[in-house]
Every structure is written in C-alpha cells, then in structure tokens.
Image (spheres, rainbow, N blue to C red):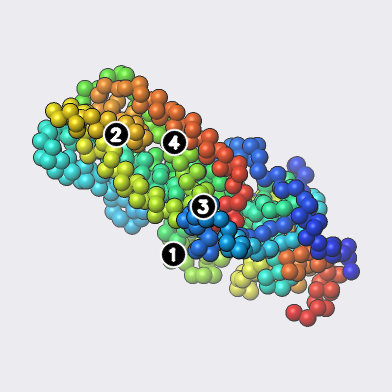
Amino acid sequence: MSVSTAIRPVSISTKDACVEFPIFDAKSRSLKKTVMGLVGGNIGGEGKVPIIEALRDISVDLGHGARVGLVGHNGAGKSTLLRLMSGIYEPTRGTAEINGRVAPVFDLGVGMDPEISGLENIMVRGLFLGMTRKQMEERVDDIADFTELGDFLRMPLRTYSTGMRVRLALGVVTSIDPEILILDEGIGAVDAAFLEKSKLRLKELVERSGLLVFASHSDEFLRELCDTAIWMEHGQIKAHGEIEEVLRAYKGTPA
Amino acid sequence: MGSQTGRVASDLVSNALSPSPSRSWARAFGDLRAGYQQRELWAHLGWQDIKQRYRRSVLGPIWITISMAVTAIALGILYAGLFGNELEVQLPNILVGFIVWAFISGCVLEGADVFIANEGLIKQLPAPLSVHVYRLVWRQTLLFAHNLIVYAIMLVVFPQDLHWTDLTAIPAFLLLAVNGAWVALLLGIITTRYRDLTPITQSVVQLMFFLTPIVWIYDDILRNPDPAIAERARLAEFNPFLHFVEIIRTPMLGQDQHLRYWVVVLVITVVGWTLALVALRLFRSRVSYWV
C-alpha cells in the first residue's frame, strides 16, 4: 500500500453558511401553478414555497491535518453539514470554500451494482471515489486480500450476504488516498473479528488523508480517530473545540 | 467549554450577506470541464448501463441491433405498401430514420430525467452535474453504434449510391451528440424543478415522431401532384427535428445534401448551448437541493 502524502494543503472554510431546502409539494412544483401565478397574481402568499432551514450560520475553518469528530442528536444537521463540507450542497447564503479532492462516504454501497461481480464493483466504486482506473488496478489485489472473499469476488454482488458486501465496500473505501475524507456514521457495522482488522485499516486511511471529518455516535471511535469535535444542534454549531471537552458538554445535556 | 461558536442567531445578520458566489460563468464552465475530466467514470458507467440492460441474456447488447432490424423491416414493408413506394427506397429510409430518431429521442427523453434518475449519486458524491449528461450522451452513442450494424447489413442488401462527400455524416453525428448534451442539460435542470415537464416531454417526442419524416419521405410529399398538399408539406421545415434527421440521413443514403439543414442545426446548436449555459450558471448549485 502506497502511503501518499497530500502535496497541496487542503482546507475547508465556511463563513455564515446556510443550507435551506425549498419544499415543493405537488402543487407548487408544477409549471401550471407558476404560469397561472404570473397571470393571476399572488393570493395571500399562497405561491410561496416553504423553506426548511437545515443549517444556519455555519462558520468553520479546518486546515491541513484537522481530525474533526461530529456529534449531535438525530436531525441536528450532521449529515447536511457533511454534505456542505463535501461540496454537494453549496450554501444558499454565506460562503463555503473547499480546497482538495473530497472522498465522502455516506453510504458504503453507493454506486455498487448487484448484477456485476465483486471485482467489477471494486473498480466502479473506486472511480466514484475519484480514483483512476490505473490506481484501482494497482489496489485490487490488496483489496481482495483484505476482504477475504477469495473466489467469491468473481460472483455477482447479488449473491453476497450483507456482511460480505460491507467487507467489499470497506475494502475499497479504505484503500483510497483521499485529500479530504468525510465519513458518516454507520461505518462500524461489521462483525467483531472483522472490525478489529478494519479499524487498523481505517486508522491508516485517516493518517493518509489530509483532513478528516467524521460523524459518529460512538465515543470510542471518535476518540480513536479525532482530536477535535463539533457539536451540532438544531442546524447550528453549538460547540467546536477539543474532543474531550465537547464530548463532556454534549453528554451532559439530556437528549 | 471550548471555543464557543454560539453566535447570535440573528436573521438580520445572515440576510445581509450577499448571495453565495455559486452563480458564475466560471463555475458553470468549470462544471463542464471537470465533468469531462472524469471521463473514465462516465465512459465506464455508460458501458455498464448498456450491459446492465441485457444482463443474463445470451445475446446481450446484440438485442439492440436485432430489435432495430425487426422494427425497421416490418415498418419498411408496411409503409412501402401503404405509400406505394419501392421497398428498396422505403426500407433504407425508414431504417436510417429509425436509427437517427432512436438517438435523438433517447437524448431528449432520458435528458428530461437525467438528474432525477441520478438522485442517489447527486446526493452522495460531489461530482460535476455534467458527468451525468456525458454518461447519457455516451450511452446513446454506444446504442447508435450497435444500430449501425443494421445499417451496414442494409448497405449490402440495398446498395446505396455513396460518395466521399457522404462522409459529412460523421460531423453531422458529432453535431447531433453536441446537441444531445445541451438538451439533456437544459431539460434536466428544468425538469428537476418542474416535474410536470416529464410527461409533457414524452408527449411532444411522441408527436414529433409522426411530424418528422421518419416513416414518410419528405421529398415524396413535396412532389405530390396536388399543389395544396405540396404547399402544406413546406410547413415541415419549421420542425427542427426534420433538420436533425435529414442532416445525417441524406449522406448516409447518398442523397442530395442541402446546406440549409447545416445552417439550421448550427443555429440551434449555438442558441441551445447558450440557453443551457445560462441555466447551468443560474441553477447548477440548486439541482442537488431540488432532486
């Protein structure tokens, strides 16, 4: 496994960034209503699209080497913040600047195809994570060893058990060289024996990456991988600082 | 407590901020460029889409070719009878018309759905929007290539009077693909916001199939002995699809090529791309919110 060090400095910096979702119900999403609206005029603000404010006034500055954990209750905006930091959502107000190639892992299986073989899936998943075909060809053997799937790699993915799929996905995800690594919770859903092995790989992956943001409900995992933390609540940053302090403050509040 | 970022939750503060700089020409062109650079990804996915459709079938993608051949032969015989044309005139016309129409309608219909269909990927990966568009046009190009096998067989059975000048079919196809890209981009963005456009697009494409000279031959109607009908046939010139079909069908069948097809298609290319770029500039960053 080649250990590459990111050459250009990576960073994520946002200033007063907001993410607001317009909720188009069936009525307001239709062309008819917009056209009619132009003709008929606005009746008591009925034409207005309701907006959900998922993130508000997010200002963070993460530099090279940052290892940030993300905590918060369900619905606090953790995943949305990760998507903002990945560049998937550009802020509706405020600014977000991301320098570096982002490898986001929200869902281990995204882009995997049940009808093609494990080996082909390794290639596709790698391309989705921003690797080149050549880079993935170099890594295939290493991934195959790690997954312990042997000849099964030549079988279509649909024949795999859930556990086998997770192994394959983890094998690919942990083989890449990301500049910015964004991990969402749920990555630890593997059987115990395999978990130990993947933890080591995950740690190596984090060490290779220039910047890590990791959302999790597991304190143990967070402490292992991160040194600072952000506590999200109601779409805003409640606290941002040294990991132990943030975790203590977060645990101190009733759910 | 660490460095508290508990800022004053004031709407006034955030409203005072200028809108984010996501709306710029640089970002719009950047999207197209970055998307093109990921060609390994979309080229691979485009292939996979085709293989996927015929997975576990013995003949695989050859089915694309077979179904095109069967449709064209059946309709060729039917319409040769209906119009009283020679089969060797009617069949090549219908066949090439079908092959070209499959590409055009594929770009339009799938273009309307391009971002909605890729919702999962758009929300999970920070890829340029154009990746999905390139993938679509590439997939349609591969389908077109499969159908060319039928065309090659047709050339053996019904030899056409081909000349060197008929190589204009190649730039003509490139123009078709370039147009397919803007259609998918523009239609994809609008449809993601206004979902009603999907059924509208489907109806329009179906209607245009009949209004475009695919099963019927434009020149035949122009030469109709009834001057009223011949006069009315001229209206077909207002159908942009006519020009897109004829620009490539005439060289493929060794027929007379007309400059006006090229002019119309080039004008549409420029106007269409301008509109698509404006839409990309304005709404590129909104698509992930809308899907």
Chain under label 4? B
Give the number of the disc on residue B236: 2
Above or below: residue A60 compared with residue A131 = below
Q: Are marks 2 and 1 in contact (CB under 8 Å)?
A: no
Instruction: For marks 1 and 3, give the CA distance.
Output: 53 Å
Horizontal relation, residue B273 to residue A209: left or right: left
Chain letter, disc 1 residue: A
Q: Are marks 4 and 2 in contact (CB under 8 Å)?
A: no
> Residue A203 at what x, y percent from top left?
72, 60
Q: Earlier in the sequence, mark 1 or mark 3?
A: 3
Left/right placement of residue A72 relative to residue A154 reads: right
Residue type for callout 1 = Arg
Residue identified by numbered label 4: B179
Circle 3 packing at 10 Å, graded few (<14), some (14-19), many (20+), is: few
Residue at x-position 28% and y-position 27%: B250
Q: Residues within 10 Å of mark 2 (few under 14, many from 20)?
A: some
Asked which quadrant contains residue B177, the reply is top left
Residue at 75% x, 69% y is A233
Quadrant in which the C terminus of chain A appears: bottom right
Q: Residue at x 42, y 59 (%)?
A: A115
Of the numbered discs 4 and 2, the one sitting upstream in the chain is 4
CA distance separating discs 1 and 4: 38 Å
Residue for badge 3 = A39
Q: Quarter of the image holding residue A199?
A: bottom right
The kind of residue tagged 3 is Val
Q: Is residue B291 above or below residue B210?
A: below
In the foreground, A28 or B176 = A28
Q: Is residue A242 left or right of residue B109?
A: right
Closer to the eye: label 3 or 2: 3
Badge 3 and badge 4 both on one subunit: no
Q: Position of residue B17 (x, y in %)?
A: 77, 50
Mark 1 vs mark 4: tell me if same chain. no
